[in-house]
Image (cartoon, grey):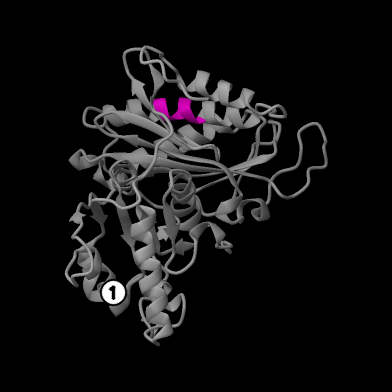
Amino acid sequence: MVHNTPTSVVTIERFIIEQEQLHAHATGDLSGILRDLALAAKMIASKVRRAGLADILGAAGTENVQGEMQQKLDLFAHETIFKAMDHGGRLCAMASEEVEHLIPIPEQFKRGKYVLLFDPLDGSSNIDVNVPVGTIFSVIRRVTKSDHNAKGDHGTIEDLLQPGRKQVASGYVVYGSSTMFVYTTGQGVHGFTLDPSIGEFLLSHPDMKIPEHGRYLSVNDAYEQYWAEPVRALMRRYRGLDGKREAMNVRYIGSLVADFHRNLLGGGVFAYPANEKSPHGKLRLLYEGNPLAFICEQAGGAAIDGEHRLLDVKPTELHQRSPLFIGSKGDVEIARQLFHEAAQKGAGHGQDVAHRGGANGK
């Protein structure tokens, strides 16, 4: 359903309800999950806006499962999302980038038919310097059967470790000069901007589309010395240094949600290749790669781990890492073709070029 009236004010709740009505057999569970996530986003946005005024900046003194120092806002965002989602009866399990294992639904609450995976506050180390940060989420239908008792069975690791193509919804929230909630349920990508005067997300970017080719290249050049030669060749291609295309503008914030959001609107590619220091990539497949890949494809873009479509990768562990090339379809296709040609010429062995930083596996 498209809202073309210039004066029409469409809240995220109204939009979700109207989208649900397009599906005769919808139960409302997925709509409820999205509404609860929007509420959690408002609460996190409120804390982020006050980050410079309250005692929530800096490290909390503990490390997460990735070995990274947890920021106080990370912990707040994680707890906020968990508490917003644990009691609705729509989820059977959750998983967070901040927690090592599956997060069960508390015993006192009913369990449902979906699982939620989320990165509560991506890029939180940038809060201290006033750089946009974000929340990323993914919703998947459980595959294990419930015994249909009063509260239903708990979800299992099998429910969480599904390929990205199995997602029924994904989205992100970017907390910047304005707060935006962007999501897809497989029916296009829609963006909502928070109006702080009324505390509502309002439809601002209906049916978002990423250009076929874009202006921006987002990559951390500091790792160039650790890249395999096919990756270096790709970056030369993007910069127009090999004479085969017009140069892209390099724009790298270092906050994934912010970089991806800019490229979604303006076109381009975000790249985080494997390298000698991170031979399997750095970004998390389930919490970052898959949710953004679903959004990107729904907006007309593409996402690969090198040669292969990211949404087809079968995860084997909750915190699995992956290389990522995501953005405008034409720009991502350049990467896929170049890596494929390098593998065919013996510069690497299939995914080795993308996954292990080079043919020698360094």
Main SS type for the magenta part?
Answer: helix
Q: Quadrant of the C terminus?
A: bottom left
In the image, residue 115 sits, relative to residue 193, either above or below, namely below
Left or right of 226, for residue 212: right
| Element at label 1 | loop
Q: Based on the displayed image, in which of its 4 quarters is residue 217 positioned?
A: bottom left
| Residue 250 position in % (x across, y down) | 19, 55
Give the residue number, with chain letter if any, for mark 1.
227
Q: Give the quadrant of residue 5.
A: top left
Residue 17 image point, x, y percent: 57, 21
Q: Position of residue 155 (x, y in %)?
A: 68, 46
Residues drawn in magenta: 37-42
Q: Looking at the image, is 39 positioned above or below residue 101?
A: above
Compared to 154, does 54 lie above or below?
A: above
Residue 185 locus on image (x, y percent): 55, 37
| Frontmost residue, 234 versus 259 | 234
Residue at image location 76% in from the left, 33% down from the top: 151
